[in-house]
Amino acid sequence: MNMYAALMLFQHAYDSQVPVHGAPWLWFSIIKILVVFTVLMVTIAYLTLAERKISAWIQDRHGPNRVGPRGLFQPLADGLKNIMKEETYPSAAYSPLFILAPVMSFIPALITFAVIPFAAPLPTPWGLVDMSIADLPVGFLYILAVASLGVYGIVLAGWSSNNKYALLGGLRSSAQMVSYEVSMGLAVVSVLLLSGNVSLSSIVSSQVATGWYFFPLLIGFFLFLVAAFAETNRLPFDLPEAESELIAGYHTEYSSMKFSMFFIAEYSNMTTASALLTTLFFGGWAVPFWTTVNTAPWHWWKTVITLVCFMLKTGFFLFLYMWIRWTLPRFRYDQLMSVGWKVMLPIALGYLVVMAGAVLALDAAGIAPTARLGGFVPTYWALLGVLNIVLAVLVFVVLDRGRLVSPASARVGPVELAELRAMALRRPAPVQGD
Amino acid sequence: MAIEIKVLERPIRQTSYVRAMLKGMAITFKHLTNPHKVTWQYPEQKWDLSPRWRGTHRMLTDENGKAKCVACGLCPQICPANCIKLVPGEDEEGNRYPLVYEIDEFRCIFCGYCQEVCPEEAIHVGRHYENSEYSRAGFVYDLERLTAQTHPVCEMWDPADPRGE
């Protein structure tokens, strides 16, 4: 019996276009876990290099370029250095939590990636393999739940260090994450309105059918983007670290590999947030304007192309993270809170009402989400997009006349300024006596 | 006398955060793609030193390879940091020469007075700066080491030609 006949026998037993089940499912899951974990860790290592390179280029420098060709082995050198360094345990710290805290921020950051579909399903002789570790039916809810566990690591690190700066950093991060999680969740409800499902793979497939959601949900995308920056503690929302005020915030007392764990957690949070932005608003692994590759029947080359596409999209958002970090200064704490509660939350709530109304109206008008105007432009998508552009213009023009984040000096209006000038001109008479 | 208060011109019109942010991001992107970098890749790329740069010392020699120094004692006399150690000796013909001549480069403040005061143009400060050592003792340069240096020496300031043209 030759190989081909053996393969035919296999194909007889298992259809490659039917989801894999039974023992092969378990094996494929284990392989996927190992591969995704490895790829994620390598990506994180190289993100630290990318961050340093991009910061250097933005500041007209070269960046690390000594270890290996063009500095490509820098992450290895950094990792080695961090492992070799001395671990310090502050005598006043509460050791059990002090040791547990880096783990508690590191693990949720990694396991959030488990539900993200990163490519089109791969057909194998044993059946169709989903290209996400676990395609949970409650996918997005799982991410919201697990991602908010990360705050425990930061708060516990801040508290157990027994250090003023660390404690303040931990407190700030809990306040910040709690505030922004609300608007993040509300911004995504509009995505769920359009897709009608919380599983990330069906969000991707409905985007393939109806067009990517960033256009019909422009404001939702923007809210989610801002909230994602706040959730990952990246500039302009990196108040928990705030070097200028809090030394290093919650990880002031950490050294060596425990410090690295916080770093890995930050970068894997960034990766997950970028992957989520891609999945929820930019069609996930879908390739733009190429329906063949985005739909069944599946083939291995489709998996490869969509994987590359997903990586490019995620990479773009990672670049955006870094680009913004090296452009914008940090918010003040009161500004952070007022943006979170007085701007983001009302906009998210109002937006949800408007979008729900719009979806209801479109359904009542009998426009199917998959209907296409002139066979090309999806009607549903375009109508919601136009509505969103109008809303976005309104929001930015009305809200963003400096009231969003006003400079400390700008509270001086023309009247007060005239008074101040008059005060300066009026020279009080020299005090007699004394 | 009353204190004058200076009231600065403050921005009265509030500006848009989003517009300012986009402007900032455009600037950073321009720098990101700009191929001109300001960093000097030091060990490969070095600054040109000024001809009057005062660095590590060098003792010049005559055609026989002997140090030009006649042990007159002017350089230890003028040295403000007191870093030159000189023990004069005399040979059979009555020529003075340095028995011991040591400069502690760690103490030296590189003022260049030794070069200015030297009647024989023997001791010079040099156009050289890479002089790290593993121990403090390594910074005490003896006569042998001073004569063995090969780097160019400092050109003294000439009052007739103050710009060195």
Image (cartoon, grey):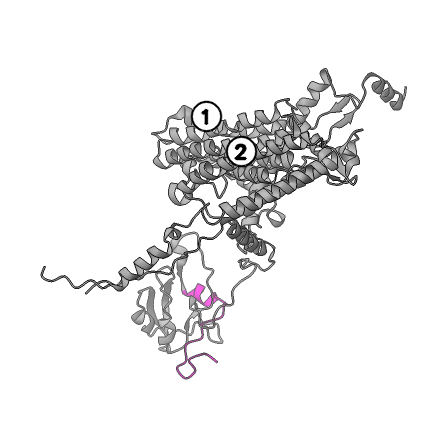
Which residue is at a point 39% across and 26% down the rendered structure image?
A: A95
How far apart marks 2 and 1 lie (CA) works out to: 28 Å
Q: Quadrant of residue A207?
A: top right
Q: Is residue A171 magenta?
A: no
Q: Residue furthest left?
A: A433
Badge 1 marks a residue whose secondary structure is helix
Give the position of the N terminus of chain A as an image quadrant: top right
What is the chain identity of the residue bearing mark 2?
A: A
Which residue is at a point 76% across and 37% down the rendered structure image?
A: A372
**Which residue is more in the foreground, B93 or A100?**
A100
Residue type at mark 2 is Met
- Where does the image place residue B112, in percent across and percent down from the top left? 38, 70
Q: Is residue B35 left or right of residue B104?
A: right
Mark 2 neighbour class, 10 Å CA radius: few under 14, some 14 to 19, many 20 or more? many
Mark 1 neighbour class, 10 Å CA radius: few under 14, some 14 to 19, many 20 or more? some
Q: Which residue is mark 1?
A: A100
Give the position of the C terminus of chain A as an image quadrant: bottom left
**Which residue is more in the foreground, A227 or B123?**
A227
Q: Residue furthest front?
A: A365
> Which label sits in the foreground, 2 or 1?
2
Judge if badges 2 and 1 mark residues of a common chain: yes
Q: Is residue A34 left or right of residue A419?
A: right
Q: Which mark is residue A184?
A: 2
- Where does the image place residue A204, in percent across and percent down from the top left? 68, 31
- Where does the image place residue A140, in percent across and percent down from the top left? 60, 27
Badge 2 marks a residue whose secondary structure is helix
- Where does the image place residue A148, in percent across and percent down from the top left? 50, 28
Dots 2, 1 in contact, CB < 8 A: no
Say above or below: A97 vs B28: above
Residue range of the region highlighted in magenta in the rendering: B143-165
Q: Is residue B157 magenta?
A: yes
What is the chain identity of the residue bearing mark 1?
A: A
